[in-house]
Amino acid sequence: MPFSTVSKKSGKTYYLHAKNVTLKGGQKQMIYYFAGKPAANVLNALPPGYKVVENDRTGLPLLKKG
């Protein structure tokens, strides 16, 4: 079951995804993002040490450490 959260502002459901990207210096980094539909790289749980917060202005979910 994919990890999802519902926006308090819009009521829309967002699904958590992860992707490995290569930065300009060649360093690889994992990025996390929310999307409206689950895709192949959807996660089933929150990564350890992260929590979901919502942008007050837009209602979009964000991951925050801590």
Image (cartoon, helix red, strand yellow):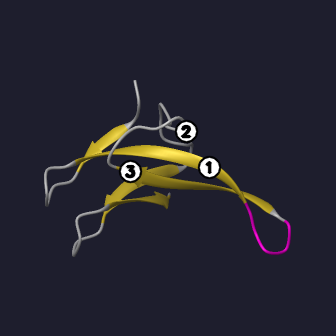
C-alpha span from label 2 to label 1: 7 Å
Q: Earlier in the sequence, mark 2 or mark 1?
A: 1
Q: Residue at x 41, y 31 (%)?
A: 2
Q: Is residue 4 above or below residue 24?
A: above
- Residue sitting at 23 percent across and 71 percent down? 58
**What residue is rendered at 21% in x and 76% in y?**
57
Magenta highlight range: 22-26
| Kind of residue at badge 2 | Asn
Q: Position of residue 35 (x, y in %)?
A: 38, 50
User: Mark 3 to mark 2: distance in Å?
Assistant: 11 Å
Specify the quadrant of the image occupied by residue 29: bottom right
Q: Does 21 sit above or below residue 17?
A: below
- Asked if the magenta segment contains residue 25, the reply would be yes
Which structural element holds mark 3?
strand
Which corner quadrant holds the N terminus?
A: top left
Seen as rendered, the residue at the extreme top is 1
Q: Amino acid at mark 3?
A: Ala
Q: Which residue is mark 2?
A: 41
Side of 48 where 62 appears, left or right = left
Name which residue type carries label 1: Lys
Q: Which residue is mark 1?
A: 19
Q: Earlier in the sequence, mark 3 or mark 2?
A: 3
Majority secondary structure in the magenta region: loop
Query: Mark on residue 7?
Result: none
Coordinates of residue 16 in the picture (x, y in percent): 44, 45
